[in-house]
Image (cartoon, helix red, strand yellow):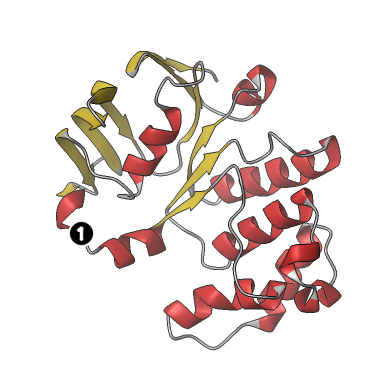
Amino acid sequence: MEQLTFRDVSYRQGGKEILKGVSAQFSAGDFVSIVGPSGSGKSTFLRLCCHLISPTEGKIFFHGKDMLQEDPIGLRKKISYCFQEPILWGNTVEDNVAFPYRVRDRKIDREKIVSLFARFHLDESYLSHEVKGLSGGEKQRISLIRTLLFEPEILLLDEVTSALDAENTELIEKEILRLNRKGVTVLWVTHNAAQSRKYADRLLTLENGRIQSLEEIK
């Protein structure tokens, strides 16, 4: 059984059709890069993948079940979305990394947090840093750490390295590849042609809201 299936999915907003008759299947452990010109529907596609928005037509299935019938909160514990502009809340970094534990009513695992910080070249002192004082690269790393504290089944990435320097980009790429090798499915929207083929095993190209191709890379 496929992990995630789009079946003739369309999405309209304000009278404009953004995605048109999209059908695709993704299996556990896939690494798929999603490319296409601006306005082709890439971000909309990712938002549909995690039920942030619902199809106007067609159906999306998660493990064979209609996604519309899934509990949205439970679903988002299994499918995580990292935005191009990292969304952080509260006053401190600790507020952000504690959040995944609170929504699951779990005890905070400080050892795991510190271990993830180390992998992203951040020391423990960052926990007390104020969010408003972080650089763009630091914010994106904290956003990913928050997502990865409870490894999702599917990781959705929307241009997460587009505004980062080479060092931060490499850190994030290596961590995402590590997760994928552990079985996490990765769907990554990127404008970087080299990056799109660097790790992915398939390349999905969107244009004018339609899938133009879904090709094997490796």
Q: Quadrant of residue 48?
A: top left
Side of 56 relative to 32 (left or right): left
- Which residue lies under the disc numbered 1? 70
Q: Is residue 73 left or right of residue 196?
A: left
Furthest-front residue in this view:
14
202 in relation to 88, above or below: above
Task: Report the number of discs.
Answer: 1
Q: Is residue 45 left or right of residue 145?
A: left
Residue for point 81% across, 64% down: 133
Whole-percent x, y for residue 138 in the image: 77, 56
Residue 196 to residue 186: above or below: above
Q: Amino acid at mark 1?
A: Glu
Image vertical order of residue 117 relative to residue 170, above or below? below
Q: Helix, strand or loop at disc 1?
A: loop
Q: Quadrant of the C terminus?
A: top right
| Residue closer to the observer: 134 or 174 | 134
Neighbours of disc 1 within 10 Å: few (<14), some (14-19), many (20+): few
- Residue 153 visible in the snapshot: yes
Report x, y in % for residue 65: 16, 50
Q: Residue at x 71, y 46 (%)?
A: 172
Whether residue 22 is visible: no
Residue 51 position, x and y percent, is 30, 49
Residue at the location (63% across, 41% down)? 160
**Quadrant housing residue 49:** top left
Where, quadrant-wise, is the N terminus in this rendering? top left
The location of residue 96, given as percent across then percent down, is 61, 71
Closer to the camera, 134 or 33?
134
